[in-house]
Amino acid sequence: MITYDAIVIGSGITGGWAAKELTEKGLETLVIERGRNVEHRKDYITEHKPNWQFPLRNARLAVGTQGAQEYPIQARTGQFHESVKHFFIKDHRNPYIEDKPFTWIQGDQVGGKSLIWGRQVYRWSDLDFEANLRDAHAVDWPIRYADLAPWYSYVERFIGVSGERLGLPQLPDGEFQPPMEMNAGEKFVKAGLERAFPDRRLTIGRVAILTQALNGRLPCHYCGPCERGCSTGSYFSSQSSTLPAARATGRLTIIPNSVVHSLIYDAAKNRVTGVRVVDTTTNETREYSSRVVFLCASTLATTRVLLNSKSARFPEGLANSSGVLGRYLMDHHFVVGASGAIEGLLDRYYQGNRPNGIYIPRFRNLGDDASRRGDYVRGFGYQGGASREGWARGGSEAGFGVELKRKLHDPGRWTMGLTGFGECLPRADNQVQLADQTDEFGIPLLRIHCTWGENELAMRKDMAASAAEMLEAGGCKEVRTRDAYKEGELGGEPGLGIHEMGTARMGRDPRTSVLNAHNQAHDVPNLFVTDGACMTSSSCVNPSITYMALTARACDYALGELKRGNL
Amino acid sequence: MSRASITRRQALEQAAMLLGGALSAPTVAGVLSTATRRAWAASPGWTPRTLSPAQLELVATMAEHIIPQTDTAGARAAGVHRFVDTLLSDHYAATERDRFLAGLADVDAHAQSAHGQPFPRCSAEQRIVLLKEMDARAYASGRGEDGWFFRRLKELTVVGYYTSEIGAMQELHMSPFGAYRGDIPYTSVGRAWS
């Protein structure tokens, strides 16, 4: 068995961070990745390709289309297009059982979903870290904002985040590069909205996309579709940022095409002593060992590995003496909001494809009487944007011929949309378990049971109504609300937010949580889980930067423990 | 005609036929980018895989009426009919493809009963009258089932045209890479970004 100082399972957003931190601190580190290798630049095979070079003109490959045949689950997300399908997993390679609709979107390559993520980054605040304690759901977080704030700064300075400082307690400012610009439509709606609602702000999205050069990465050139990969490294991905840093230490080894079957546990030492891997090209089994293991395989994949690592000491899954492993699955509920049209501004336009929209920070249940709701706890934020209608409107209106062509020569009216992202309560009955069936690598399938609860459904009503109210205040006409969720159907189901989190939560008490305040397993000291599985509650903001900050912090702690001889 | 036996002359004739004589093949080679020319060169014997030659001509004729040649090329020169055949062959589920093909048959049947000719052989005036009827029905309030085909054909024509090199680069412009400017006078741009 080959031995390393550290093994990191997964090479996506958190795996890349763990690799960077551990190698930079001197550890010989092995990164195990289930998917194929993807090299920065060389493997961005669709970058800057114009539409006419795609046979289907970069069509959305919806469920039921021929291009989606190997991707019946992945095709549920609107992001699944001809130009990016090679960055999504073929579903037969990761089958699972959904009791109720639950969409599990995964990458299957080095870099994981860091290549295709939404890049929106928002810090949590104590409103989030204290939420469970305050309204008595699940268990209290073992950390507070002050514990994570320096690590947010550390991460932001490395990944590069552009955004506007607002001074809001519920959405702390970070280390920002200059913000991207809002367009004329967004500025117009912002003015009316903030006049009508002095407690609400409309700001440009905070994104992990550079507006200034950083560490050899260039500022954004506004080509638009980041998710195809970016040769200038302008958005944060493992390929553009963390893996090169780890590689530069000379202490990084990455093995792709290697899916982790389980962890090997030594009860006498009470340590994880090895990782059992199945080679996805040959189906051969290999084992690796290390002093410390970081699980960064993505929320559900991580929990699946733990559940499948059974021993006499841990018959229900490794580090699961509490019995909560697999429980308290969350996602952000969305596909609810409103849109409207702006009259006028027809003399205004924009240039460049800005890979970012606007953000309206949470304004409900902030702890004061004015923002308190009687019908639900927690809150939501909105993402959205304004644009002028393009040629696509030609297919939805009467008329053809020279008249149509002349009409489409000019852009249409301005429209503005808002989509809410709502916090999901941690509930024990939203859970994953191992099924009896196994996949082609001999690993038991996950059975996923997850539904939205009453709190989410009550919040959605407000998410739609408040979006409409703000658009109207912002001067929009023909405002329409939208809520794609229908119980038992696809369209707004859990998982679609691709912010799945929880199932191996952090907590103060080993009897009710899997991980401690440093993402270290209560039960097994040399095991760390730093991806979304660790989350104790969900906030309403995009989670990735919090995972990154937790990972960097956990690596720092693990190094200290190694030095102190505790691991 | 098999793909292997096609001659270069036949290929050029076929290309010219598909372009409706609006532009000769050498002209096309002159105005399109290297990438597009390479793409065309790689499939000189392009033949439809789902549409019959008659159906292909019907699609090309209708599409050209929807987005005609003006001071820039129209749908036929942009290869919208090829795009439609590709979608029908490689994208649509069988039920949707059959529904589309049935819609095409209806158009010819309607033209036949009204003018005794399949649609492409009707006079331009007759075709425009037929299209106006279809357009009115397709976008009438309620957007009924019987308008589905024409709405779909028009959507495909618009998508196929404005995502083609001709539509995206000649009729409209692509936003240049470099900077983002969120609030500029429309007059400084002068046409929609593709």
Image: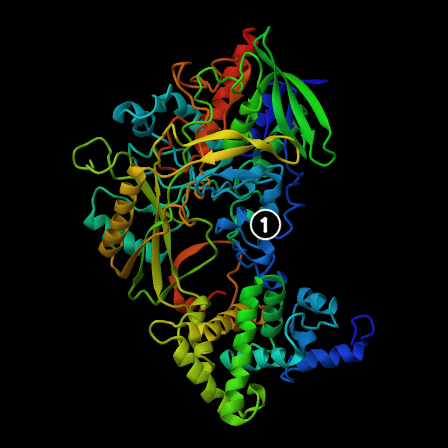
- The foreground one among A430 and A409 is A430
Toward which corner of the image does residue A11 lie, by quadrant?
top right
Quadrant location of the N terminus of chain B in the rendered image: bottom right
Q: How is the image coloured?
A: rainbow
> Is A553 on the left-hand or right-hand side of A70?
left
Residue A117 sits above or below residue A525 on the image: below
Residue B1 higher or lower than A162, as above or below: below
Residue under label 1, please give it.
A85
Q: Within 10 angstroms of label 1, few (less than 14), some, or many (20 or more) residues?
A: many
Q: Position of residue A490 (x, y in %)?
A: 43, 49
SS class, disc 1: helix
Q: Position of residue A418 (x, y in %)?
A: 34, 51
Above/below status of A475 relative to A215: below
Residue A27 drawn at (x, y percent) = 62, 18
The three-letter code of the residue at mark 1 reads Lys
Any part of residue A361 in sight: no
Q: Kindly identify which chain the residue marked by label 1 belongs to.
A: A
User: Residue placed farthest to the left in the image?
Assistant: A369
Looking at the image, residue A508 sits to the left or right of residue B83; the answer is left
Going 25% across and 45% down the picture, which residue do you hit?
A: A462
Residue at the spot x=36%, y=31% of the render? Answer: A124
Q: In this rendered view, identify the residue nearer to me: A449 or B60.
A: A449
Q: Position of residue A125 (x, y in %)?
A: 33, 29
Is residue A518 shown to the viewer in this render?
A: yes
Image quarter for residue B72?
Answer: bottom right
Q: Residue at x 65, y 82 (%)?
A: B23
Residue at left 39%, top 72%? B144
Front position in the image: B183 or A18? A18
